[in-house]
Image (cartoon, grey):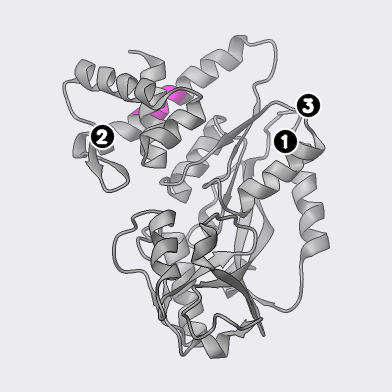
Amino acid sequence: MDLNAVRTFVAVADSGQYQAAADHLRITQQGASKRVASLEKELGVRLFTRVARGVRLTVDGQALLPRARELLRAAERFTAAVSPTPRPLRIDVIGRRIAPSNILRDFYREHPDIELDVVTLANADTTTAMAEISAGTLDATFRSLRASTLVVPAGLRSSRVIDDRHELLVGPLHPLANARTVTLAELAHHPVWMPGMADAEPMGYYEDLAKTFGLTIDTIGPSFGVEALLTEIAHSSRLATFVGEGSRYLWPESYDLCRIPIVDPAPVYPLSVIWRADNPHPVLAAFLEYLHVRYRTTARDDVWAPAWAG
């Protein structure tokens, strides 16, 4: 079996898009499609079905995914056993637009000589990500640990290192468009739209936030991607959404979108870094120290985080 085809299958499954997987693997989208097609032909099943703005796993694809991950972990261990030099530091940032990715980029700017692989397990749950850490195929990941605080596997370590402050994103027609800041009390009168959320951890966080402050946070409906969401927000007098202060989004200048800081208190999405205690990678310790120093110097008291965040 072609390991490159298996690796491409996993990358497409994690990103939900052939182009994103191709970018990560540094191949063309056509090359990614051919690899998956060859794997489908070899196995005699379809692994993906096309949906709006991407693909999703078929039932056969869902059954194959955990076994494909096991195969890649075994290949990684085999290579590591005979390799005279360590592989690049491999960090899962979940998504390339959000705070962990931007923080990792800042670290890389300070250490441009390191070898680094940036991984995005956007569609993998925390249990799957921690399995990759335990197996040694990932060096670190970032998760909220809302549902997993008490079940971090033996041998792994976690530490809260990111408090991503919320901002409200609105278009020019929204009643709050001219506000310099907005309080959670004021937000109780305005619905927040976050469609397509499926991961239990962020969904649980926003349920906690809504319950604590009496907010209406609507997660119902499919997600057609960030670009479609921004377009809807730009032309609506009612819709608003949350974005993290550490996230980066681009939109046409004509949209005239506004990012408004939320205050009194500022809700933060807490993220912990997870790593394996006995991981000997020579760059990992420096990265962890960078995260801890950054957190100590940027942490503030005027924030709200759910009780389970510690």
- Kindly indicate whether the residue at mark 1 contacts the one at mark 3 (C-beta within 8 angstroms): no
SS label for mark 1: helix
Name the amino acid, label 1. Answer: Leu
- The image quadrant that residue 199 belongs to is bottom left
Position of the C terminus by quadrant: bottom right
Residue at the farthest front position: 254
Q: Earlier in the sequence, mark 3 or mark 2?
A: 2
**For mark 1, what is the residue?**
284
Mark 2 neighbour class, 10 Å CA radius: few under 14, some 14 to 19, many 20 or more: many
The residue located at (66%, 81%) in the rendering is 180
For label 2, the residue is 61
The answer, for residue 83, to whether it is visible in the render is yes
Disc 3/disc 2 C-alpha distance (Å): 38 Å
Q: Are marks 1 and 2 in contact (CB under 8 Å)?
A: no
Residue 70 lies in magenta, yes or no? yes
Q: Position of residue 149 (x, y in %)?
A: 55, 59
Where in the figure is residue 124, as x and y percent of width and height?
Answer: 42, 45
- Answer above or below: position of 279 versus 4: below
Residue 270 figure quarter: bottom right
Q: Nearer the viewer, residue 251 or 2?
A: 251
What's the distance in space between the residues labelled 3 and 1, CA to CA? Answer: 14 Å
SS under mark 3:
loop
Dot 2 lies on which element? Answer: helix
The boundaries of the magenta stretch are 68-72
Count neighbours of disc 1 (C-alpha within 10 A) and say few if under 14, some if 14 to 19, many if 20 or more: some
Image-quadrant location for residue 256: bottom right
> Residues under labels 1 and 2: Cα distance?
33 Å
